[in-house]
Amino acid sequence: MIGLEEFLAEGRSWLASVADVRTTRAWGEGSDSVAIFENWTAEQERAETDRIRAYEQAKFDAGFGAITWSPEYGGRDLPVAYLLAFRRLEGEFDVPRRTEMFPVTQQLIAPTIAQWGTEEQRATYVRAMLRTNVIACQLFSETEAGSDLAAVRTKATRLDDGRWLLDGHKVWTSGARVADYGVAVTRTDATAAKHAGLTVFLVPMDAEGVTVRPIRQMTGGTSFNEVYLDGVVLDDALRLGPEGQGWKVALTVLASERLDSGSLGLENADQAVELARNLGRPLDALERDQVADLITRSYVQRVTGMRVAAAVVSGQDPGPEASVGKLLATDTMARTSEVVRALLGAELSANSERWGTWAWTEHVLGAPGYRIAGGTDEIQHNIIAERVLGLPREPRP
């Protein structure tokens, strides 16, 4: 096995051949965007997706896109420590920042297919997703089945010829406009217990009967979409996992999603601290206290992220710590908004055209969304209460 230092030297050489070294920007230089969710048109989303995909494909071909995977899938079969080290190294270079679609495809969906897919599905999709030849979105949430995923109403009915007929409505789907496939949780047995009657399918997003409608957010953007499945007919070869085992398949996806959420919001928290340093006036005692609190809490979030990473590197399941990381991330976002509101006052809601001020409106309006995305705060609290503190479940009436 290649040594870590040699691996990093190899990675640094490749990164230097495709990107410039990231330099520390002076305050007032470059973009001041601190948006939580992208605010693109459909054309802009497609163009950015293509730009990121080109980089991810080059990275895969150079041997850095599937570091921990087996050679069967184009990987190098190296320990997770190598992946984490390369990610830190990658942060030193000006490479495209991955939008949500890419972690969903490479870190959530591809591993789920590798675990639950048939031999044909693994051969068809896993390598293609790791290289981003194929990208995927999650068709999980519904209007009455967000955190309670097992309450989905989208139906999949087996036809006489063995194919499936899907009818339903999914919501809050990121990247649906550019995805090739959607991973859909459906109800296939209405008579079974809630968690037992589910089945997962790989839905081609260009299939007849699939309609994507953007959802206008209060930031003005349309990062999310509604997806309507009206009489979508799928071959049984697109079923992912055994019939009726969809809950277990979905949990595989959700576990990875929460594991990857612990670093959310930290970059913008750092930007808020820089705002305090460059405000152009001295801070009062309350403002200084708020900024210090934000710095302290962001360090706690970073330490928790390190603990999760250490557990993964050692081959352990970080379990509830991933939920703690998610809670800390949403708390950091909320406190970042509080600090910015205190520092900017009216300048937050009136465009003064001063760099680093008006841009914060998109953060303040977008940050509350992450209390829902990736498992609500309430769900994370329940996981911690039951699995860490050992508290009993409240009996249902």
Image (tube, grey):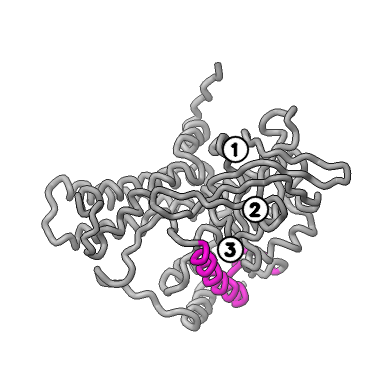
Residue 149 bears which disc, if any?
A: 1
The mark nearer the N terminus, 2 or 3, is: 3
- The amino acid beneath tag 1 is Leu
Label 2 packing within 10 angstroms: few (<14), some (14-19), many (20+): many
Q: Residue furthest bottom?
A: 17
Q: Are marks 2 and 3 in contact (CB under 8 Å)?
A: no
Residue 79 bears which disc, if any?
A: 3
Query: What is the spatial separation of the Cα atoms under label 3 and label 1, in whole angstroms?
Result: 33 Å
Residue 21 bears which disc, if any?
A: none
Q: In the figure, 344 relative to 327: above or below?
A: below
Q: Residue at x 58, y 61 (%)?
A: 178
Q: Is residue 82 left or right of residue 327?
A: right
Q: Residue at x 51, y 42 (%)?
A: 375
Where is residue 396, by image quadrant? top right
Query: What is the spatial separation of the Cα atoms under label 2 and label 1, in whole angstroms?
Result: 16 Å
Q: Residue at x 21, y 48 (%)?
A: 342
The mark nearer the N terminus, 3 or 1, is: 3
Label 1 packing within 10 angstroms: few (<14), some (14-19), many (20+): many
The reply to whether the magenta stretch includes residue 65 is yes
The main secondary structure of the magenta stretch is helix
- The amino acid beneath tag 2 is Gly
Which range of residues does the magenta coloring cover?
A: 42-71
Q: Are marks 3 and 1 in contact (CB under 8 Å)?
A: no
Give 315 or 100, whichever is nearer the viewer: 100
Q: Is residue 206 left or right of residue 288?
A: right
Q: Secondary structure at mark 2?
A: strand
Q: Residue 12: percent from the left, percent from the top?
A: 48, 78
- Which of the two discs, 2 and 3, sits closer to the camera? 2
Q: Which residue is mark 2?
A: 182
